[in-house]
Image: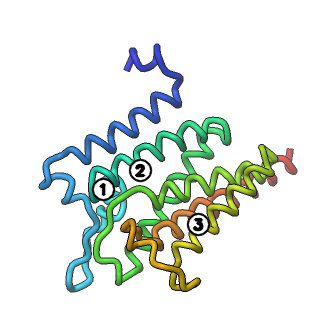
Amino acid sequence: MQFLRQVMRPWQAVAALAVLCLLVLQGLEQSGWIAWRFVRAADGSYAAWQLIASQFVHLSWAHALGNAAAAALLAWIAKHMAPALVSFVALLAAMFAVAAVLAWDAQCLYYAGISGALHGWLAGLLLWCIGVGNQRGVAVTALVVLCLKLLWQAQWLLGLPALSSVVPIYTPAHVAGVSGGLTAMVLMLAGRRFMVASA
């Protein structure tokens, strides 16, 4: 850890540690990481702890590497977009929103991956930038693109070819993550304005 402090800034060390954890979990023996996946039994029951744990393991190495790269990139971007606490709240809210949709959607029989939470983390950061006036034009554009991506994924709304035929994507997790990240930022921005007004 001392070596990391010497060669990296704190956010870089955190990003590296997060990516390392994702890849270590993926590298566990099958009996290890598969147990972390969310799986709904035939009777509809499931282990509640898997709602969160499943977001730290993936269905394949390609899946894990892609999300690890996205997580590292987002950690770098987050440093320039919002305070660390704001960033953490956006990510945590997105993760719990994904967990909620997994629990609610009886059609979801299994799940693994952190992409839903990453979508929410990004959406929350973008809304924060819009709210505080940090690169507002860029943030608005990026948020619109993110929402259009979700609409594209929701092929049942637009009648487009199923994105899942190319990449196995559970779209409700992405939608839930974005909803969670945005909701958290709306509340934080409202609290920020209240505190400024009360000062």
Q: Which residue is under mark 3?
A: 149
Residue with the mark numbered 1? 58
Camera-side residue of 131 and 62: 62
Position of residue 88 in the picture relative to residue 170 (left or right)? right
Identity of the residue drawn at 34% across and 36% down? 20
User: Residue 167's spot in the image, x, y percent?
Assistant: 39, 65
Element carrying mark 3: helix
Q: Secondary structure at mark 1?
A: loop
User: Could you say where residue 118 lies in the image, as x and y percent from the top left?
Assistant: 50, 54
**Dot 2 alpha-carbon crowd within 10 angstroms: few under 14, some 14 to 19, many 20 or more:** many
The spot of residue 107 in percent (x, y) is 35, 83
Choose the circle earlier in sequence order: 1 or 3. Answer: 1
Residue 67, numbered circle: 2
Residue at the spot x=70%, y=63% of the render?
144
Query: Mark 3: which amino acid?
Result: Lys
Mark 1 near mark 2, Cβ–Cβ under 8 Å? yes
**Residue at coordinates 24% horizontally, 58% vertically from top-left?**
36
Q: Position of residue 59 (x, y in %)?
A: 28, 59
Label placed on residue 178: none
Cβ–Cβ below 8 Å for labels 1 and 3?
Answer: no
Q: Residues within 10 Å of mark 1 (few under 14, many from 20)?
A: many
Report the amino acid beneath label 1.
His
How far is disc 2 from disc 3 in space, using C-alphas? 17 Å
Image height of 24 relative to 107, above or below? above
Give the CA separation, mark 1 to mark 3. Answer: 22 Å
Q: In this rendering, which labeled residue sits more in front, label 2 or label 3?
A: 3
- Mark toward the start of the polypeptide (2 vs 3): 2
Left of 86 or right of it: where is 50? left
Please state if 186 lies on the left or on the right of 150 as rendered.
Answer: right
Q: Nearer the viewer, residue 6 or 164?
A: 164
